[in-house]
Image: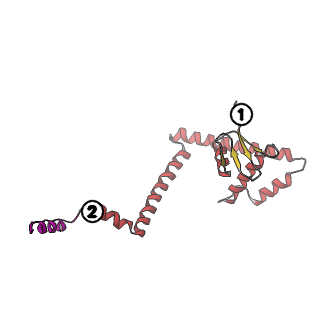
């Protein structure tokens, strides 16, 4: 098994990906997680592994966008479980619960794929991509119309009227 990718966190709070030799953001960390890339985040000053803290920052950022996964009540229960005799049990229970949920979700996708012959998540993703493309083209068309570029585009595409051509020919033949 290969070594995990190393991300260094500098005192200026910037994250540096040593494999890609560039600074990255929490969005890039999220992308690595989604792509199942094994990585570790090391604090440059103390040399401590701070991966969990960075992952918590990613979760915090995601919780602030859109519909949160964790309710206020759930977060309160998690906080209350720290320091108690059940702390290790609660962490293990939550981890096993999420793994079970993910396995059941994958099994359901596999069953639907076997019955219907199509991956439902892939199908929804394809439809969403097509709808986005359509929406984008409509937005571009509206933008062109509102800025007056549509008239210019039509003028460029339209052939010159025959009357103008005839007028030019007669003015040349008059000479």
Disc assigned to residue 175: none
Cα–Cα gap, marks 1 and 2: 62 Å
Residue closer to the observer: 160 or 115: 160
| 158 lies left or right of 31 | left
Q: Main secondary structure of the magenta part?
A: helix
Task: Give yes or no for residue 168 being in the magenta stretch.
Answer: yes
Q: Residue at x 17, y 65 (%)?
A: 165
Q: Quadrant of residue 145?
A: bottom left
Report x, y in % for residue 2. Answer: 69, 31
| The furthest residue to the top | 1
| Mark drawn on residue 158 | 2
Q: Residues within 10 Å of mark 2 (few under 14, many from 20)?
A: few
Quadrant of the frame with the C terminus: bottom left
Residue 138: image quadrant is bottom left
Quarter placement of the N terminus: top right
Percent coordinates x, y for residue 116 in the rendering: 51, 42
Extent of the magenta region: 160-175
The residue tagged 1 is 3
Kindly give the residue lying farthest to the left in the view shown.
Answer: 174
Between 42 and 38, which is closer to the camera in this rendering?
Answer: 42
Element type at marker 1?
A: loop
Relative to 84, 144 lies left or right = left
Q: Residues within 10 Å of mark 1 (few under 14, many from 20)?
A: few
Q: Is residue 2 above or below residue 79?
A: above
């Amino acid at each position: 098994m290969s070594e995990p990718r190393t991300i260094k966190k500098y005192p200026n709070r910037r994250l540096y990906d040593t494999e890609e030799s560039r600074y990255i953001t929490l969005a890039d960390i999220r992308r690595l997680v989604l792509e199942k890339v094994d990585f570790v985040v090391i604090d440059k000053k103390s040399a401590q592994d701070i991966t969990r803290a960075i992952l918590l920052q990613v979760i915090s950022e995601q919780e602030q966008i859109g519909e949160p996964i964790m309710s206020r009540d759930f977060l309160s229960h998690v906080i209350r479980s720290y320091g108690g005799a059940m702390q290790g049990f609660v962490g293990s229970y939550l981890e096993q619960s999420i793994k079970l949920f993910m396995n059941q979700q994958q099994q359901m996708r596999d069953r639907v794929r076997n019955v219907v012959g199509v991956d439902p998540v892939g199908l929804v993703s394809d439809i969403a991509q097509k709808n986005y493309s359509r929406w984008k083209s409509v937005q571009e068309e509206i933008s062109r119309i509102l800025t007056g570029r549509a008239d210019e585009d039509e003028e460029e595409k339209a052939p010159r009227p025959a009357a103008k051509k005839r007028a030019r020919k007669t003015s040349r033949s008059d000479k």
